[in-house]
Image: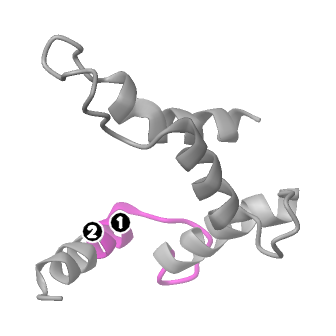
Amino acid sequence: MKRIAALLAFFCAPVLAQNPAQTPPETPRGPTLEQIAQLFFHQYDANGDGTVTRREFLTPSMNQFDFLDRNADGAVDMQEVTAFTQMMTQQQRQPK
């Protein structure tokens, strides 16, 4: 449950961080709560049955951890995280 709350907070942060004095009310920024819910189920409901099991919820995180843990020692160190961020930076710089 804490993880769901953290996920929702992460996706809602841009919406909550808006300064109403700077953003006209007719200009929505960030995803709506409905879009957040749809994104959640799109990402985690692997079998599309409308429910998210513990296994479905944990699998993306476990896969991400395994991807980051390049030497498969069961821990992610700063060197592995740095390599990942460099890889992501290079991918973002490539023309699409």
Label 2 sits on what residue type? Thr
- Quadrant of the image occupied by residue 46: bottom right
Q: Position of residue 11 (x, y in %)?
A: 47, 41
Residue pictured at 70% horizontal, 58% vertical? 41
Q: Which mark is residue 54?
A: none
- Quadrant of the image occupied by residue 56: bottom right
Count of labels in the image: 2
Q: Position of residue 30 (x, y in %)?
A: 35, 41
Circle 1 crowding by C-alpha within 10 Å: few under 14, some 14–19, many from 20: some
Residue 32 drawn in magenta: no
Residue 70 drawn in magenta: yes
Quarter containing the N terminus: top right
Q: In the image, is 31 to the left or to the right of 56?
A: left
89 or 5: nearer the viewer: 5
Label 1 sits on what residue type? Val
Please identify the residue farthest to the top as the structure is shown.
21
Quarter containing the C terminus: bottom left
Circle 2 crowding by C-alpha within 10 Å: few under 14, some 14–19, many from 20: few
- Quadrant of the image occupied by residue 63: bottom right
Q: In the image, is 68 to the left or to the right of 95?
A: right
Residue that numbered label 2 is attached to = 85
Q: Position of residue 47 (x, y in %)?
A: 83, 76
Label pair 1/2, CB-CB below 8 angstroms: yes
82 or 48: nearer the viewer: 48
Q: Position of residue 85 (x, y in %)?
A: 27, 68
Q: Which mark is residue 81?
A: 1
Up-down: is 68 above or below 20? below
Residue pictured at 57% horizontal, 69% vertical? 65
Up-down: is 89 above or below 34? below
Up-down: is 16 above or below 88? above
Q: Mark 1, mark 2: which one is toward the viewer?
A: 2
Range drawn in magenta: 69-84
